[in-house]
């Protein structure tokens, strides 16, 4: 189960920005950022891993943040029930 509360959706001169809160139960799925899409998120509760296409990963937990750059392809793995705040710009 995944839930999203998008609190901001604003048009920018060169694209859009989305900010909100996201919550998910454990699971693993593929992610692919668009050529101009990027995300910065901060974990409020739980743990997750972001896997890159080469087999590496970064793991973050409460109070830690992660930046996902434009064009990124890989996987998102929720290890423990996760709540995060996010900002996506495209």
Image: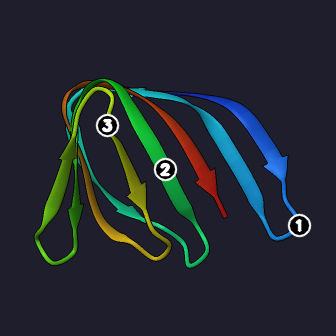
Name which residue lies at 58% across and 66% down.
37
Q: Is residue 51 above or below residue 48?
A: below
> In the orientation shown, which residue stands out farthest toward the front?
63
Label located before the other in sequence (1 or 3)? 1
In the rendered structure, the answer to whether residue 80 lies left or right of residue 21 reads: left
Question: Real-space Cα distance between discs 2 and 3?
Answer: 11 Å
Name which residue lies at 78% across and 65% down.
15
Disc 3 crowd, CA 10 A, few/some/many (<14, 14-19, 20+): some
Q: Position of residue 38 (x, y in %)?
A: 53, 62
In the rendered structure, the answer to whether residue 24 lies left or right of residue 46 reads: right
Question: Real-space Cα distance between discs 1 and 3?
Answer: 30 Å
Q: Nearer the viewer, mark 1 or mark 3?
A: 3
Question: Real-space Cα distance between discs 2 and 1?
Answer: 20 Å
Label located before the other in sequence (2 or 1)? 1
Residue contact at pointers 2 and 1, CB within 8 angstroms: no
Disc 2 crowd, CA 10 A, few/some/many (<14, 14-19, 20+): some
Disc 1 crowd, CA 10 A, few/some/many (<14, 14-19, 20+): few
- Quarter in which the N terminus is drawn: top left
Q: Is residue 74 above or below residue 2?
A: below
In the rendered structure, the answer to whether residue 17 lies left or right of residue 48 reads: right
**Residue 64: mark:** 3
Residue at mark 2: 40
- Quarter in which the C terminus is drawn: bottom right
* Residue at disc 2, secondary structure: strand
Q: Nearer the viewer, residue 74 or 2?
A: 74
Residue at mark 1: 13
Q: Position of residue 78 (x, y in %)?
A: 22, 37
In the rendered structure, the answer to whether residue 14 lies left or right of residue 26 reads: right
Label located before the other in sequence (2 or 3)? 2
Q: Nearer the viewer, residue 40 or 32?
A: 40
């Amino acid at each position: 189960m995944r839930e999203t509360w998008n609190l901001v959706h604003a048009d920018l001169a060169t694209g859009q920005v989305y900010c909100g809160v996201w919550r998910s139960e454990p699971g693993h799925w593929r992610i692919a950022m668009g050529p101009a899409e990027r995300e910065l998120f901060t974990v409020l509760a739980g743990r997750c891993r972001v896997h890159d296409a080469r087999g590496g990963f970064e793991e973050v937990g409460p109070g830690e943040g992660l930046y996902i750059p434009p064009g990124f392809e890989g996987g998102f793995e929720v290890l423990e029930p996760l709540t995060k705040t996010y900002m996506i710009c495209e």
